[in-house]
Amino acid sequence: MVKQHVTTTVNGDAVELLCDPTQTLLDILRDELDMKGTKEGCGTGDCGACSVTMDGVLVCSCLVLGVEANGASVETIEGMAEGEELHPLQQKFIDHIALQCGICTPGLLVASKALLEENPDPTESEIRYWLAGNLCRCTGYHKIIEAVQDAAAEMRGN
Amino acid sequence: MGRAPSPFATKIPYEKKDLKIVGSNPTARGDAVDKVTGRARYASDITLPGQLIGRVLRSSHARANIRSIDTSAAEALPGVKAVVTKDDFPDMEVEHAASGELMVNFRDVTRNMMARENVLYDGHPVAAVAATSDAIAREALTLIKVDYEVLPHVIDVRDAMKDDAPVLHEDQFTKGVEPKPTKPSNIAARMESKLGDIDKGFEEAEIIIEREFNTKPVHQGYIEPQASVANYTEGGLAEVWTGTQGHFVFRAQIAKLLKMDMSKVKVIPTELGGGFGGKNNVYLEPLAVMLSKKGKRPVKMVMDRDEVFRATGPTSGTNVKVKMGCTKDGRITAAQAELNYQSGAYAGSSLPLATITVFTRYDLENVSVIGHDVTTNRPKVAAYRAPGAPMVAFGVETVIDEMARECGIDAIDFRLLNAAKEGTQTHFGPKLGPVGYIQTLERAKAHAHLKEKLGPNQGRGVATGFWFTLGAETSATVNIGEDGTATLIFGTVDVTGGSRSAFAMIVAEELGIPFEKVRTMSGDTSALGFNFMTAGSRGTAAGSMAAVTATRKAIARMCEIAARKWEVEPDEVVWEDGKARPAGANVGDFAPMTVAELAKEASWFGGTIAGHAEINVAQGGPGFGTHVVDVEVDRRTGAVKILRYTLIQDAGKAVYPEFIEGQFQGGAVQGIGTALNEEYIYNDKGQLENTGFLDYRIPVASDVPFINTEIVEVPNPDHPYGIRGIGEVPIIPPLPAIANAIHDAVGIRMRDHPMSPPKVLRALKDQMIEDAAGQGTAAE
């Protein structure tokens, strides 16, 4: 298939590449841009490990074609910390032991950040339903929910 | 487990002392920053220059003979660099080896990784290719022609045991039966475990309850699919990066399966994206090495999720019969079970473990367990967190719930009356040492959870679990840097990040330096002596024994340096509070030396400071846990909601308490998934129908509440810090605890797993019909 010219922005950096029309945004990130922080757990949009935002909207990057990212602004886990300064969600995930094996962690952090941008003061139930698309097999979610609650409080200035 | 205990195994007696670091909750966990920033490297993140992409062609037949395989068209496709089939791998003799908590047979391992004369399940590999891109590799698979002779198949364990069932292996005669059967059978083995006189036990019983239970296979459900990168060079050396629970065992298996010297295979364990027992077995690794050898380039292989479900894991589907008797005052007099366990396509399920642990939570005189290991047309089963235990607990703990109700005794009190304790004779051999089972029951009884009021259609259930702590071969090296910081190289794969931190805490405690001054890192197979897998809850328990041993050798070396400097004998120097000190006033007036000061002088006084350990840790320090759950049953839909959950478990010593809580919570939620949703669903062709997370639905955040946890600490007497394994016990009680809670809520006894809405709804309807019939009879 003829490759398509794609111009996009990833974590604020302009990116230009030739993209096979069958490649997903996840393939582009991992295989073309060598950004391995976004993980693949299923390839069918069921596990959320590949969560990124595209123009501020939370998506499973395995369900987005690379060509669809043309002209869009993509944010991934690699763009979350500012230098050595971790995002409050990243710090709270560490503080609360909200990660064990860590394979779901990038997706959960991206999804949690999208939640707090939309709803800075979510209830426990709202967090649980928002994150219901991000599977974690190690933690039982308990400490993830606590970490998001704590990060939300800190980001609100409490 | 799997092997006889060695008389030369290492035990270090428990040392009661004040601890500064062990038992705290450090926030500067070694693996965490890389994991939250996306920098942690998992196997599928490894990319080698010039790498090819490898993919596997899998059978969609549940059972068929392979007449021929034609790979010529695939080989001719531009971009294809290598194709392998069974012809590229040597056949193996029958030879058994421990691989995690289960045993494997190399004759079967080679057939499971690449089919030889036949395929035995949907997903069975028949060929593999390596190409310059994933797309070309996938296209190449479509060009491989396999001529199959499709044969009748059997999936269910009860069907497979019938006389007229299709027999998977014509050369399989049931082991453990005398005289040797003359007809081949799917029953690969019959096992027994006995204590006392079961007939006498039932004679003494005033209440006897006998029930039958069925469970479906469930998958470990790790989020990271299997992935491996292999590089075979012309010099005959192979390097393999892979997600594994035991790189040394993988090295041994790769070498064996490819007839290579072990020294020529190096396995580098990457960060592991979940295993739970499912990454104890080689699947891709030998294929990747052979493709790399033939393709003369590195090869990367990553499974798709449907391949993970079709061809790795899962656990056994089971049929379990439990018969127990007790006196009216609640003393169990007899406990009998028959366990029928699917092993999948090849013999060797978790049955040996299940058979010997069915009743281990109780102090019993009369026990009889018979088990059958049964081959069926499903993937070869793999260990899954306390392999085999949740299914037997489902039977035993719900029968005990029924007995307690018959006696009019509270569920926890009934268990306390019969609880295993120090000195209890197990039916697997040894008497128990000090264990914390009774403490977990007493703490459960006192928990605030039990004071919460229940509403209509709500109920409460209790169940308990037991599991071993495996010992086995463990090696570690401690290097003291010239600046006085320490690096521990460990060889037990850290499956969660917890043991890495626990080791750092223990080494810091031993040395008397801050936690932040100790780095712990995983060593590849060239860095250390053999380490058995992280299995049997042994990661922190056994790994820390090696860490302590290695650190104490480094301390001895530091005392030697001080002695040489002070010109005294080494035994005149002691190690206290992180410093080498003169053993007494008579030795001389020397200023104590810190690790940093000793490290600076080490070179002059004989060389760098290090300590290493190569030990075989004794098995011991089993764990016990008690779970209490409240559920609400929706009578219209059959859906069961978890309202409240409390888990109490003996950890021996919690090195890193918050992390242990996290593992407790994760194990409980996996158990909730097993109880309520998860199951393998096959169609009539023997093909797995739910090969993705949409249809194989593991618990999501909105399915579960917060999980209350409490840690009991009854020290393991054979460990210097008293540590017990904690990883596996939490998955055992949820299935029966939830079944008991459903009964408490709506009066139905669930004996078929999973307790999903359709099954609960059917049971509720059956109950209504029975009630109506009962009323009808009464009216007549």
Image: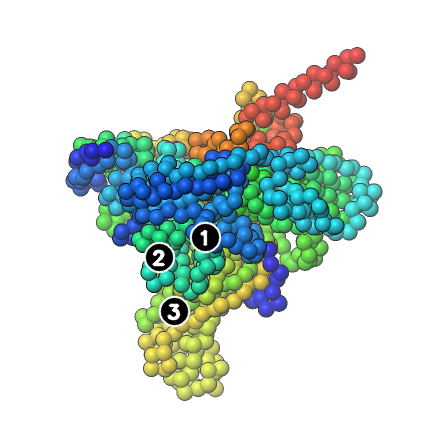
- Indicate the chain on which mark 2 is placed: B
Please tell me if label 3 and label 1 are on a single chain: yes
Can you tell which mark lies on residue B89?
1
Check whether the beta carbons of the residues at disc 2 and disc 1 lie within 8 A of each other.
no
Q: Which residue type carries mark 1?
A: Phe
- SS of the residue under disc 1: loop
Q: Nearer the viewer, residue B523 or B683?
A: B683
Q: Nearer the viewer, residue B464 or A136?
A: A136
Instruction: State the separation of the CA atoms marked 3 and 1.
Output: 41 Å
- Indicate the chain on which mark 1 is placed: B
Residue B497: percent from left, percent from top? 42, 52
Work out whether residue B488 can be spotted.
no
Q: Nearer the viewer, residue A91 or B127?
A: B127
Residue at 38%, 65% (x, y): give it.
Answer: B487
Residue at 41%, 68% (x, y): give it.
Answer: B478
Q: Which residue type carries mark 3?
A: Asn
Q: Is residue B407 above or below residue B510?
A: above
Left/right of residue B550 with respect to residue A38 in the rendered view: right
Front tag of 3 and 1: 1
Mark 2 or mark 1, earlier in chain: 1
Task: Say which quadrant the C terminus of chain B sits in.
Answer: top right
Can you tell which mark lies on residue B479?
3
- SS of the residue under disc 3: strand
Residue B97: percent from left, percent from top? 55, 57
Q: Which residue is mark 2?
A: B232
Front tag of 2 and 1: 1
Instruction: State the separation of the CA atoms marked 3 and 2.
Output: 31 Å
Residue B94: percent from left, percent from top? 57, 55
